[in-house]
Amino acid sequence: MKIAVVGTGYVGLPTGVGLAELGNDVICIDKDENKINSLKAGKLTIFEYGLEELFNKNTANGKVKFTTSMQEAVQDADLVILAVGTPPNPITKEADMKYIYAAAEELAQYISGYTVIAVKSTVPVNTGDEVEKIVASQKPKGEFDVVSLPEFLREGFAVHDFFNPDRIIVGANTERAKNVIAKLYEPFAGKTKILYVHRRSSETIKYASNAFLAMKIQYINEMADFCEKAGADVYEVAQGMGLDSRIGNKFLNPGPGYGGFCFPKDTNAMAYMGRVKGVDLSLIEATIQGNDKRKINMAKRILETVDNIRNPHIAVLGAAFKGGTDDCRESPAMQIIQVLLEKGASITLYDPEAMGNAQKILGDKVSYASDMYAALPNADVLAILTEWEDFKSLDLAKVKQLMKTPKIVDLRNIINRDEARSLGFEIHALGVQ
Ligand code: NAD
């Protein structure tokens, strides 16, 4: 199948490369010339496990190509996948649809024959109808259908999730479009549940899923706070809860709050849609507020360990919103660091993959270390904010030698507390004693 993928970000790039690996002829288009020049030169623009190998293979054999020209990308395409950003409006927090609508208007001028336009970006319910209107208003040369094809990949596991999806949701209102998508997903038939639903249901499924997952995270975070006060252990509680198949054992890990490009913006966008439609979505509203407060509370916890020091120096390990990605968008680490800085702390930061993106947000407000041990000298406290594998293997004896005071606030619960305590560390973790 000839496929154009519009937008080569965290979703578009792994999707384009993955579809090429499945044998399709893919052209990825982005309006960001720097990204396209870099990709054309064989240099990846994001970090994702396993992406480099597939990228190298499929660029070398010509199955995936890159362009900034919409015409070149879509003129012969059977399928155009929209994977542009839908960032939150800074005031209302509704999904900003300008990139989707601009892309729809532009691509409409170049499609030919019969083309399926699939919206992979996370978009408000009714977007399919809007895209249909926009494309039709440009009087395209060919016939077309618009489908909803929401993306459920987890950043950091994008390649794994592309080839091993839990489920594939297709919102198609015509048989003709459905058949094209069935052909696209033929390699998954029999292995993965493919659910065909109405386009608006498909758009809703994406938001309903992300809001539910965010709520589950906020719930276990609240339980972690409760366990600390009640003398219980949140992992034992999570294990006991997770054995109930109605609850399930995933997403029951306490942390500093959910972040990333999706959960914050999607919960906010869903809450906005509820308000506009006059529907009480108070569970989602409470989740958003609780998660916002949590990050401030996490910064307070770090500061409490050094409240006898006027301008403490804090070593921070972790900038990405979770391990396995270089993405710092809405990262709890970034928000916690901002609060620490406002309270007068100085910070040395290290992250194995996200230093470039962290620097774009924090500039010269913090110092940057070349490795995890280089972040530690003179630190009054070490704060662990992202669950990178590297951090689990910290040599604690060496850490103690480098720090000014042996204090750790582990907001990812990855440090061996017994070992740390036996070495003389004061260590604070979440939901445990
Ligand atoms: P991103 O910001 O990383 O990438 C979007 C890309 O689209 C950018 O490179 C931008 O330059 C490009 N773009 C914007 N307008 C364009 C246009 N008119 N023509 C060509 N290119 C254009 O965003 P992302 O993280 O890949 O997310 C994309 C969508 O997928 C969002 O709606 C997001 O909510 C959704 N989503 C993201 C994830 C995730 O883990 N990041 C998971 C599931 C769904």
Image (tube, rainbow, N blue to C red):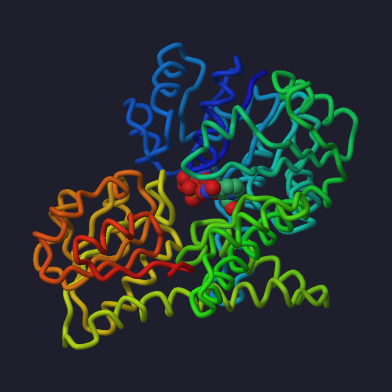
- For residue 177, which quarter of the picture? top right
Number of marks? 0
Q: Quadrant of the C terminus?
A: bottom left
Q: Nearer the viewer, residue 220 or 30?
A: 220
- Residue 161 position within the rendered picture, expressed as x and y whole percent measured from the top left: 58, 35
* Coordinates of residue 184 in the picture (x, y in percent): 72, 23
Q: Nearer the viewer, residue 217 or 269?
A: 217
Compared to 391, does 400 lie above or below?
A: below
Q: Is residue 7 above or below residue 51?
A: below
- Could you say which quadrant of the image residue 332 lies in? bottom left
328 left or right of 264 in image: left
Q: Is residue 99 visible?
A: no
Q: Residue at x 44, y 29 (%)?
A: 51
Q: Is residue 188 left or right of residue 308?
A: right
Q: Eyeballing the image, is 53 above or below 320?
A: above
The residue positioned 23% from the left and 61% from the top of the image is: 422
Please determine whether, in this image, residue 356 is positioned above or below residue 259: above
Furthest residue to the top? 61
